[in-house]
Image (cartoon, helix red, strand yellow):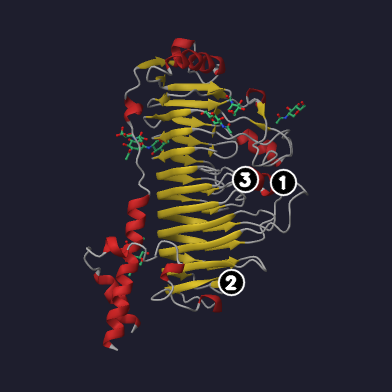
Amino acid sequence: MKISFLLSYVLLVHAFYGAWCSLGGSLHCEYSNSQILHRPHSVSITEFGAVGDGVTLNTKAFQNALFYLNTFSDKGGAKLFVPAGQWLTGSFDLISHLTLWLDKGATILGSTNSENWPVVDPLPSYGRGRELPGRRHRSLIYGQNLTDVVITGENGTIDGQGSIWWDWFRNGELNYTRPHLVELINATGLIISNLTFLNSPFWNIHPVYCRDVFVKNLTILAPLDSPNTDGVDPDSSTNVCIEDCYIVTGDDLVSIKSGWDEYGISYARPSSKIKINRLTGQTTSSSGIAIGSEMSGGVSDIYIKDLHLFNSNTGIRIKTSPGRGGYVRNVHVSNVKLDNVQKAIRFTGKYGEHPDGNFDTKALPAIEKITFENVSGEDIGVAGLLEGIEGDEFKNICFLNVTLRVKKNSKQAPWRCSNVRGYSQWVSPEISCDSFEESIFPEHSSDCFGLSENNVETSSGLSRSPWLFFWYVNEV
Ligand SMILES: *[C@@H]1O[C@H](CO)[C@@H](O)[C@H](O)[C@H]1NC(C)=O
Ligand SMILES: *[C@@H]1O[C@H](CO)[C@@H](O)[C@H](O)[C@H]1NC(C)=O
Ligand SMILES: *[C@@H]1O[C@H](CO)[C@@H](O)[C@H](O)[C@H]1NC(C)=O
Ligand SMILES: *[C@@H]1O[C@H](CO)[C@@H](O)[C@H](O)[C@H]1NC(C)=O
Ligand SMILES: *[C@@H]1O[C@H](CO)[C@@H](O)[C@H](O)[C@H]1NC(C)=O
Ligand SMILES: *[C@@H]1O[C@H](CO)[C@@H](O)[C@H](O)[C@H]1NC(C)=O
Ligand SMILES: *[C@@H]1O[C@H](CO)[C@@H](O)[C@H](O)[C@H]1NC(C)=O
Ligand SMILES: *[C@@H]1O[C@H](CO)[C@@H](O)[C@H](O)[C@H]1NC(C)=O
């Protein structure tokens, strides 16, 4: 008894320090902010004839300013200063080595005339516009093939004035898929920080085929019933960090994607190495953090920490479908706090929504190694609604220290599972599903992402954690 107790204790401690080391060591959210402050050249948008009265259309002024500033790209880059005022504009194109600075009281307003949002080709990994076949409106702030772009300021605002787009959508009056507020395609080195985003026509921020993306300290707001106003959607992008954001919108707060069915499979550009820290917000229709449903290029190495959601529909959701192909693996979600959330954790294996009839029904996604650690919730409707795909079980799904207080009047079972398998420990209410009856420690910690014992060597010098001891004594 005593020997087995000690042995298990040692294994537990090693397992946990392994997780800490791999989390702390592998993926810091580091960036260099020297560019933000020290662009050697700076011009104000007013020098290009812009008028901040909320009525004058300033698209030409933005385009001319950026055309001029492009001449400084090999001289340390430049800053475009937007002072206090209401700067109405249509879509414009950014340049490399640029800081777009929105000063205190500055608002960039999106035009409410769809002709000021030109139409561009669909993304190759989607094969068509996301909501309508064919081409799509270009985002308000757009860029392709850029490096070193910073969009920041002193809590300036980018307001898409999206309500007219939401009405066009609801009334079936759109000719093309709605535009995002910011979309950067194939950018390297992107910082978006210290700003407020309001009322996007469609998704707010869409980095696609990008690397080294840092999104920090944003407020993103849209009405709770506005259609598809996702907050931040990293798409086929790698090395992305999203930190300290407050997001309240009509769709997912953050949604990680990588292309759609046969188009995403053949473009084969995954999303990987994504860290989301300290995200707070609300969505009454969708999820705090979603992965998919477009995930055909694969999604891996995702670390989500300190998520706080209130009065919301779903906490964390993985969405996929036969036909998507691809994978979602190596996801670690920790320190989640949910207040009054209908579904805490949800997996949907039959999400549907295909770009056309040419998808391959045999292209089954691989969903594996998803760990939830330190999750707590009050006033929860359903703790886990976990639906995999028949003949394509989601596996190595792990729940460690998950406490979800389900509403007293809830008539549903707290956990419902099909075609999903994994391990659980210290979960309340207890997972009733047979496919989770085995505990994580001591035998299965290496099957769970983020809890493996790979780092036993590096952890051996660390002091022991008293709470592990406490838990173990309780288990005995
Ligand atoms: C971006 O690069 C691709 C591939 O080199 C090229 O086809 C495309 O025209 C470039 N786009 C712009 C706006 O430079
Ligand atoms: C991405 O941008 C780089 C320039 O930054 C360019 O060389 C490359 O061809 C682009 N790739 C694609 C697929 O557009
Ligand atoms: C966040 O941004 C606001 C302005 O939007 C600024 O006042 C504050 O200092 C920023 N906080 C951090 C931690 O950068
Ligand atoms: C930034 O502005 C938004 C709305 O304009 C406001 O809700 C938010 O509290 C402001 N943030 C800071 C840090 O001042
Ligand atoms: C769709 O196209 C028609 C015909 O060109 C045009 O009148 C209408 O304004 C367009 N709708 C939108 C939302 O752009
Ligand atoms: C945000 O603003 C704060 C306060 O001005 C500044 O210290 C910080 O460097 C800014 N951060 C980013 C990432 O822009
Ligand atoms: C889980 O919570 C414990 C106790 O607060 C903490 O020591 C540990 O670091 C947390 N785990 C993660 C992955 O943050
Ligand atoms: C369990 O998770 C909660 C947060 O949800 C944390 O406060 C607590 O310390 C964790 N307990 C252990 C033993 O990790």
- Left or right, residue 460 beside residue 323: left
189 to 396, vertically: above or below: above
Residue drawn at (37%, 20%), measured in percent from left and top?
76
- The residue drawn where x is 53% and y is 48% is 256
Q: Quadrant of ligand 4?
A: top left
Q: Tell me which numbered mark, 1 or 2, is placed earlier along the sequence.
A: 1
Q: Which residue is mark 1?
A: 355
Q: Is residue 343 visible?
A: no
Residue 428, percent from left and from top: 44, 74
User: Residue 417, labelled with which disc?
Assistant: 2
Residue 303 image point, x, y percent: 43, 53
N-terminal of the pair, mark 2 or mark 3, is: 3
Q: Position of residue 431 (x, y in %)?
A: 50, 75
Viewer-closest of 320 and 457: 457
Judge the density around disc 3: few (<14), some (14-19), many (≥20) Cα neighbours within 10 Å: many
Q: Residue furthest right?
A: 357
Q: Are marks 2 and 3 in contact (CB under 8 Å)?
A: no
Location of the N terminus (image quadrant): bottom left
Q: Residue at x 55, y 79 (%)?
A: 434
Tell which of 334 and 357 is nearer to you. Answer: 357
Image disc number at residue 259: 3
For the residue carrying disc 1, how many other residues have a C-alpha within 10 Å: few (<14), some (14-19), or many (20+)? some
